[in-house]
Each structure stands twice: as C-alpha cells, then as structure tokens.
Amino acid sequence: MNNDYREVNQNEPEAQQIYIETPIYKEAVSHYRTTQYYFMSFNSCKIVCGFALLYMNHKQIYLNYWILAVMFHAFIMIIIHKNHLKYLAMNKRILAYKLDQIMVAPSVEQVIEQRKLNILSRQIKLEIVKLTIFGKWCCRVIAIIYQIIFGYGVYLFCIYYSMKSEELMYQFYFLCAILVISLYQFIDLYLILVFAILGSPFLIILSCYYCANLFSKEQQRNEIKTRLQAIKYKPNLIEGEQECCICRCPYELNEEVVILKCSKLHHYHETCIMSWININNTCPFCRKSI
Ligand SMILES: [Zn+2]
Ligand SMILES: [Zn+2]
C-alpha cells in the first residue's frame, strides 16, 4: 500500500509545474503602486490649491509665478508617476523574472519582513526608472528644477517677512507648506549641507594644521637625508655583521652604505635606510633618533 503511494508520487509529470510570482513580490508591487498613487494625489492637491490661490489673487506678483512653477512641476510629476504605473502594469512578470521573484507553484505561506519588502519595492522603483522614457537622467533634471523652485521659495519667504502684506496670506501659507514638505523630503541632504557649512571653519583649520605638519615632517626628512653620509662598502670599513639590518642582504663591494651615529654596528644600505626614513626617523635597530 505504502509502496504504491510512493510510486504514484514519483511519476507525477514535471511539465505541469507552474511558475508564479513570490508573495513578497506581489506585496512589494502593491506597496510601490500605493506610493505612486500617494505621490500623484499629493501633486494633484498642489495643482488644485495653486489654481485656487491664483484665482484669489489677480495681481502679477512673484508669489504667483512661484505657485505657477510649483504647479507645472507637480503636473510633470503626475505624468511621470502615471508612466511608471503603466510600465509596471505591462511588465510586471518580466520584472519578476529580472528581480528573481519567480518560483515553482504552489506558493508557501511566508512571513513578509518589512525591511525585505522595502528593499524589493525600492528595487522595483529603480528598475522602472531605469527602463521607462522618463529615465534616471530625466528624473534627476526634474529634481534639480525642483531644488531651484525650492531655493526661489526660500528667497520669497525672506522678502515676504520684510514686507508682510496681509492680502498675500494664503499664498504665503501655501509657500510655507511646500517649503516644509520639501525640507522633509530631502532632510538628510539639507542636514549634511548645514553641518558642512557649520563645520567648514574647523575643517579648514584642521586641514591647514595637517598640511603644516606634513610639510615640517617632509623638511625634517630632507634634512636627515642630506646629513647622512653614505660610504662605498669595503669589508674593512664596517664592523660586526657584513649585512644590512633592514633587508638582511650581505653587502657587495662598492655598494652605498650608511652607518648611523647611534652605533658603529647599526649600518644599512643607503636605499633601505632612505625608504625607512620616509616612515620613521629613528634607527630601525635601537630606536634612537637619527
Ligand atoms: Zn638593505
Ligand atoms: Zn641604532
């Protein structure tokens, strides 16, 4: 009875194996889709608010130009997100193959870790950005444009504080909201920038000190190199072992040899001791200063 059962199992045709997407991939795709929808609704919100604010104030002022720029950017972003979603819908399975997220059915229930999910979602995003018409460079250019709009916003913010006209109140709130969100989006970048600016005097002092230190050491070394007199090797000129204490090679006739002042027994090849001095200016044998 048992044998029969095993036989039936082994004879199962392998051709019937079905390849399906892994559960984590499905989850990551829906995660990615949700974030895209979130960005699209956020950008639509910007456009709607922009129209309302432009309608409320007909005066040709810089704040309105800035709102127009923000709206234009939001519009482009919506097109890009839509394009990415369309690409995903058409190439979901190809992407799964590419990201190695295909397995033989039936799927095993697995615990989906949030960290793995985030990584996979980011991978999907990178793949899509790489492969669509609005590729990596286009996204970068748009990010730079956004930074310029943001910079201009900060400039307007300063101007507004110097004049404080009451009729521009809502535009000003809109400006503040966008600035806060932009700041939040790139908070790590701005923090690095702030720290770099705050820390630059210390960095400059530190690098000056380092350069000065390096320079004085270099001078010291050059001074030592000129002071050390090499002699041409003859067996009767040198005491003790007739070999270099650094490379342990016996001296050959007429080779350049340096005897240090610490002891007549501490002698080296000129080339060996010169390269040693580049690292350390003490005798390699007894550690006395050269
Ligand atoms: Zn040597
Ligand atoms: Zn020595």
Image: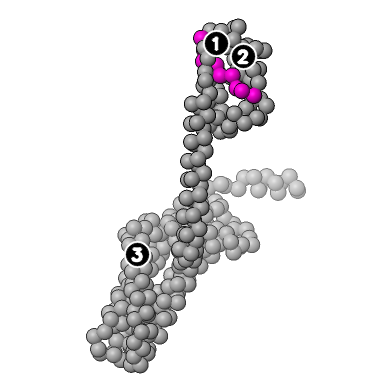
Q: Earlier in the sequence, mark 3 or mark 1?
A: 3
Q: Nearer the viewer, mark 2 or mark 1?
A: 1
- Decide: few, some or many residues near mark 2? Use Cα within 10 Å; few <14, some 14-19, many ≥20: some
Q: Which residue is pictured at 41% across the width and 63% down the height?
A: 88
Decide which of 198, 18 is in the foreground and name it: 198
Q: Which residue is pictured at 50% across the width and 49% down the height?
A: 209
Contact between marks 2 and 1 (CB within 8 A): the answer is no
Q: Is mark 1 within 8 Å of ligand 1?
A: no
Looking at the rendering, the stretch of residues picked out in magenta corresponds to 254-262
Q: Amino acid at mark 2?
A: Glu
Residue assigned mark 3: 144
Q: Earlier in the sequence, mark 2 or mark 1?
A: 1
Q: Nearer the viewer, mark 3 or mark 1?
A: 1
Q: Is mark 3 within 8 Å of ligand 1?
A: no
Decide which of 275, 52 is in the foreground and name it: 275
Residue assigned mark 2: 243
Contact between marks 3 and 1 (CB within 8 A): the answer is no
Residue assigned mark 1: 233
Decide which of 89, 258 is in the foreground and name it: 258
Q: Is residue 171 visible?
A: no
Mark 2 lies on a secondary structure that is loop
